[in-house]
Every structure is written in C-alpha cells, then in structure tokens.
Image: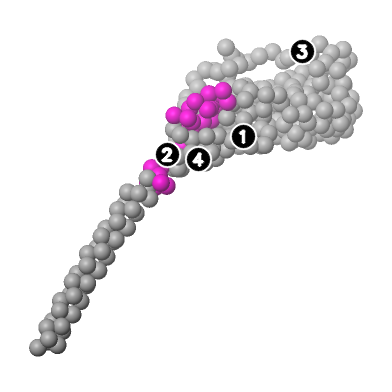
Amino acid sequence: MPFLMSSKRIKKMIAILFLHVGLISGILCGLIWMFFQWGLPAITKHGQAITVPNLKGIPIEELKEILATRHLRYKLTEDIIYLPSYPPSVVLEQYPKPGAHVKEGRSIYITLNAAQPPEVVMPNLVDGSVRNAHITLKSRGLAYNTITYVTDIAKNAVLEQWYNGKPIDPGTRIPQGSKIDLIVGAGLNKHLVVVPDLIGMPAEEAELLLLDAGMCVGKTAYEYIDLLQSGTIFQQQPKVGSQVNLGDPIHIWVVEANPHTIDVEPKIDEPIIGDKPIPDVVEIYSDSSMLSIESDLQ
C-alpha cells in the first residue's frame, strides 16, 4: 500500500512538472514573439523607411536643414562637375536617388556644382577643318564663338585661333566653357553657297554638314510635334536650294522631346562683324546653335 501511494504521488508530481514546463515554455514563446514584434523594430527602426527627397539645385547652405527634418545626413563626394547653367555650390547629383527608401540616419552622398569652372588645355586647331575644330572644342568643353572668313588659298581651313581678343597658343589653360574665335580660309574668291536639305536630320549632324559647306547654324527653335523623332529638324530658313553668302547662318526648328511649343519666328540677324584687324574679311558668323529663340530674341 505505501508503495502504491508513492507511485501515485510520483505520477502527480510528474504531471505538475510537465504543466509547469508547459507554462514556462508558453511564457518564453510569448516573450520571444513580443520581442520580435515590438522590441526589435524599436531598436532597428525596421519598417520606418524614409523617402529620399530630390535635392538637385539645392544650395549647400540649405542641405543640412532640409535633411535634418527627415532625420537624414549628407556627405560630399570628391567628384568635380561644372555646369554653367547652374549656380555655384548647388547639388547636381545625389545617391541614393530621389524617391529611394532608406533608414533614419542614412547619409546622402552629394556632388556639388564647382564654384569655378575647371581649366582645360587649349587644343591646336590651326590647319584643321572647321568641322574638326568644332568637334575638338566640344570634346574639351569649349565652343567656337565667331568664325571669320578671310581670303586665303587654304579654303575652309583654320588659319588662326583667338581667345578674348588675342591669339591663343595650343597648350594654354583656359576655363571650361570658354569660346574661341576662328579665322578660316575662304579661298581666293568670294563664293555663294547652296543651302542643303536639313529636314529630318539630327541637329548635330546638320551643324557638321553646314560647317563643311561654309555655313553655320543660326537660331534654333524647339517645338514638340507628335510622330516626329525628337532632336531632328522639321523646318529651316533659308529654304533648301537657296543661295547664300559664305558664312551665312541657317536657322533651324528642332523637334522637342517634351510637349513645349515655341511660336516665335526667328529673327534674321545681320552677320556679326568682329573688331579684330583681319584683312580681306569675307564674312563673320556666330556659333549660336546652343541658344534658343526665347533667350536670343528678348
């Protein structure tokens, strides 16, 4: 009998033990679930993503305040970019990009517009064609300003290169974005040239064609036209087949990518006359292909 009582007591104790183990296990599982549900997110801020704002064009002085309201920071990269169309020390590039989702405290990497344009080396354009001069200058972040045709046997060849009213030697360092004046041979006689067909051509290709033919791009208008490829020419003035003087500008209308219509007719300007004492001047024209009618005619 005592043995039987002891056996029952042992079974009861085992049952109580399992009950306690089950309760403790349940409590532990509950605590673990609560930790992952509320505790861990509170520590890691999991699920609290912040949308990165668009900072392009924002001055550096305003960055800290703008990002602080979103609990973000910024770091400047060592990249050097200069765009003359933007003010100095404003944001040009950022990473992560606008609209990205990041955690609180994330650093946004910022590239600013340089306060001063970087210097580039002036290339040697003499004895090359006007076409090559345009391509070479563009590759260096430079451009041609005026082209003066003078009587010379070396037709369409660059004879001299000028900067700020003075001849400039190859290898001279000048600010990026500078414009160079070119003195170009016109042949031994004055000539009339025939305006080529530019319709349907990309604007850059048309400019090279005109330079080869002794003309230049004048005013450029941009207009959105459905079903036409953006960047191509849909109208020109003077018209195809017209005869113009060597160096005359040809005005073009280019299909714009975004809907934006310019309805101002281009004003036909007189050729730009330079003030340098160049003998036997035939014609002078300006490289205004990068200017829009809106800004030029105001």
Q: Where is residue 252 in the image (x, y as percent from the top left)?
A: 60, 26
Measured Cα–Cα span from mark 4 to mark 3: 57 Å
Q: Quadrant of residue 114?
A: top right
Question: For residue 153, which quarter of the picture?
Answer: top right
Element at label 1: strand
Q: Residue at label 2?
A: 50
Residue 289: x percent and y percent?
65, 26
Q: Which amino acid does the dot numbered 4 rest on? A: Arg
Secondary structure of the residue carrying numbered label 2: strand
Residue located beneath label 4 in the image: 106
Earlier sequence position, callout 2 versus callout 1: 2
Q: Which residue is drawn at 43% across and 38% down?
A: 51
Label 4 SS: loop
Q: Which one is earlier in the sequence, the residue at label 2 or at label 3?
A: 2
Number of residues whose C-alpha sits closer than 10 Å to that of mark 1, classed few (under 14), some (14–19) or many (20 or more) = some
Q: How far apart are marks 2 and 1 (CA)?
A: 20 Å
Nearer to me, 292 or 248: 292
Q: Does the magenta stretch include residue 64?
A: yes
Judge by depth and name the residue closer to the eye, 295 or 110. 110
Q: Check residue 76 in the rendering and tell me which mark sits there, or answer none.
A: 1
- Which residues lie in the magenta part? 43-69
Q: Which amino acid type is marked by label 2?
A: Ile
23 above or below 286?
A: below
The residues bearing labels 1 and 3 have C-alpha atoms spaced at a distance of 46 Å
Kind of element beneath mark 3: loop
Other-residue count near label 4 (Cα within 10 Å), few / some / many at <14 / 14–19 / ≥20: some
Left-right relation of 126 to 233: right
